[in-house]
Amino acid sequence: MLTWKEALADRMPPELAREIDIYETQIELKRQGKIDDKVFAETRLRRGTYGQRYDNGQRDDGTGPKELEFPDRSLTKGPETLWHAPGMQRIKIPFGGLTARQLEVLADLAEEYSDAICHVTTRQDIQLHFVHIEDTPDLMRRLAAEGITTREACGNSIRNVTGCPLAGVCRAETFDVTPYAKATSRFLLGHPDCQDLGRKFKIAFSGCAENPCGLVFMHDLGFIARTRVVDGHEQRGFETYVGGGLGAVPYQAKLYDEFIPESEILPLAQAIARVFARLGEKKNRARARMKFLVAKLGFEEFRRLVEEERRILPADDAWTAFLSGVRAVEAAPVIDGGVPGGADIDAGRFEQWQRTNIYRQRQPGYVVATVTLPLGDATSFQMRRLADIARRFCGDSIRATVDQNILLRWVREADLPALYAALEEIGLGEPGAGSIVDITACPGTDTCKLGIASSRGLAAELQERLVARSIHLDQAVRDLHIKISGCFNSCGQHHVADLGFYGVSRNVGGRTVPHFQVVLGGRWDRNGGAYGLAIGAVPSKRIPDVVDRMTERYVRERNKDERFQDFCARIGKRELKALLSDLMEVPAYDKDRDFYSDWRDPREFTLGDLGVGECAGEVVSLVEFSLAESERRAFEAQLLLESGQVEAADHMAYSAMIEAARALVRVQYPDLRDDAEEIVREFRTRFYDTELFFDKYAGGRFAQFLFKRHEDAQRRSFSEERVRQLIEEASLFIEAAHACDAKLASRGVMPAVSSSGDDPARVQ
């Protein structure tokens, strides 16, 4: 029997084939113990191969991974395995562009090597989970034969270049950004100047400024299409932004230039990559993204260095070679005739689907149909049938989207009934695209090692409830966006949602309770034009109540045509938090055990039983009191910022971190003075230097937020943007303090306690 390497030898691009051969050799060297673990980790990450959580939410409690049954491979593999647990394979799909044949191959790979599920990500990639690493070379060869690579889908590299999925057919676009996104992806893939980056680097293209399709403002490098007239001729170019990013502490990108000519975008990207590679942080990964480099250097100095780098770049024909064909992309439909009508359809449901899932192209008579994928998932069966449907209705004009759906473009408007019938037949005819029921969620605790709470479980629960009553929802509520991340890293893009949630945990009576922070104030339109802030943590099981309360009050009290973000700003954070305050309470374990497990996972989150004393009231530790006080201060900082008191907000956010640090130090040192200098010194000695504050995923990076602000006290400058970032940092520091407290409790370290009526001394 031929191996895939032999069978596909003539169909793979030689450079991709050679790379995969090298990667397969590295796997063998790792098996033999002849390659360093860290080196191999970066090697496989740059090929898009991740380790993953294998227990579908289980903690390291000795229960062991669950067993999965995988279909037989068409080609057998050796008896030995590199690791016991399969991982995740990310597949790079530049600007989300797919063909029908590629859908079929992805379906085959998911079925043969994975769990028969293709997952669309928030960066227009495709992910396969539960993939054995020894299968990845053949998986990559089969992709390469269809023009797809996994190279630099992960790791410290230029990640997938994203682009507006409506590019070329959008009614609002300045021009089609597709060829520019494609050229940028090809030019930077494997480029020598992009191989020594300290962290990942993300690029996005948008055809307009108003809509969210490109989300330019949350990227390291973003381009918005622009034109200008020079000597009577229209010239294409891009409004260019640098230094954006979400993650734990989001930064909005800064305007680099109002107009970069189209011929300059590739050399500019190359120059920026060179500056980032040379000057970006390499040791402290928490400060290694480009947004931190721009902040460290200052924007003007960063720009000066980039322009200097641009002047010394050796000329490259590839900078402009693609420009001759940019106006010839998808200039005409790919299907000439009509498609025979489908089976009888539910007229009411079809009308609802048309209203939410159809976008009329700027080309008369043609539309874009959104195929809604619940949680971004499609089965192998659905992907194969979707490939057949695409061939019938739109050919290869297929795009994955940043909100985890798939678009079929250039569909004849007259063919919509038949298209809808075909989609309904395979279970992909759900309406609600782009509405409140179309919830974005990262993998969370299902498969991600960083997941704290079940983002997918919560998303599925919310989706089920909202769909059940969608017909009764006010239109203003239907238009809202919900985005959920399993941790603070914002893979679910919670910062730019109307209602954003990210997973955290709380220690309640010695047991870990899954919670979600509620994030308000984000703006999805205008390319992700504003970031929200967390107003408080709510037990996971009460998040549906949060959605109900927030939307009901919005409908009841909004002004005419008032947007949700404007409503929240008018009401104010204090009132909004008060609206949710009772939902933040956790009933005792013996009163309601349901709170001590997460959505769609019956197992309990537990750290073991702790002895509980009795007195006039429930015994509450001073740590819990102080952490609650630190949360109050972090929220007070938001209120001060909201009222324009920038400097006061900065000081309050700093005092929130001081209070959280003091809470932990007093576990070991009850006589600690109310002095910031002593608190920081003792915290560093007792918790940072000893790594007690360290998390196995985040390390001690959140402690750096406190240290940096403390050291900066005398030379502090104040701006709204910087204070917003400090508030984010304070919230993350407090979450890390909660986690540290839970870790100490699990080890049987009993903090000093106070009766429920006492209030600890405060450090302002």
Image (spheres, rainbow, N blue to C red):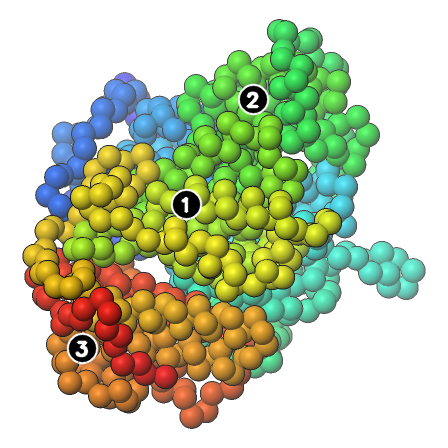
Q: Is residue 230 above or below residue 470?
A: below
Q: Which of marks 1 and 3 is nearer the N terminus?
A: 1
Residue 444 placement, left or right of 147: left
Q: Is residue 174 above or below residue 404?
A: below
- Residue named by callout 1: 543
- Say which residue label 2 marks: 429
Distance in Å between CA atoms under marks 1 and 3: 33 Å
Determine if residue 173 is in view: yes
Q: How crowded is mark 1: few (under 14 residues within 10 Å), some or many (20 or more)?
A: many
**How far apart are labels 2 and 3 at the CA level?**
58 Å
User: Which of the labelled discs sits on residue 666, or is there none?
Assistant: 3
As drawn, is 620 to the left or to the right of 600?
A: left
- Residue 381 vs 146, above or below: the answer is above
- Residue lying furthest front: 616
State the SS at label 2: loop
From the viewer's perspective, is the residue at label 2 or at label 1 nearer? 1
The quarter of the picture where residue 301 lies is bottom right
Label 3 crowd bin: few (<14), some (14–19), many (20+), radius 10 Å: many
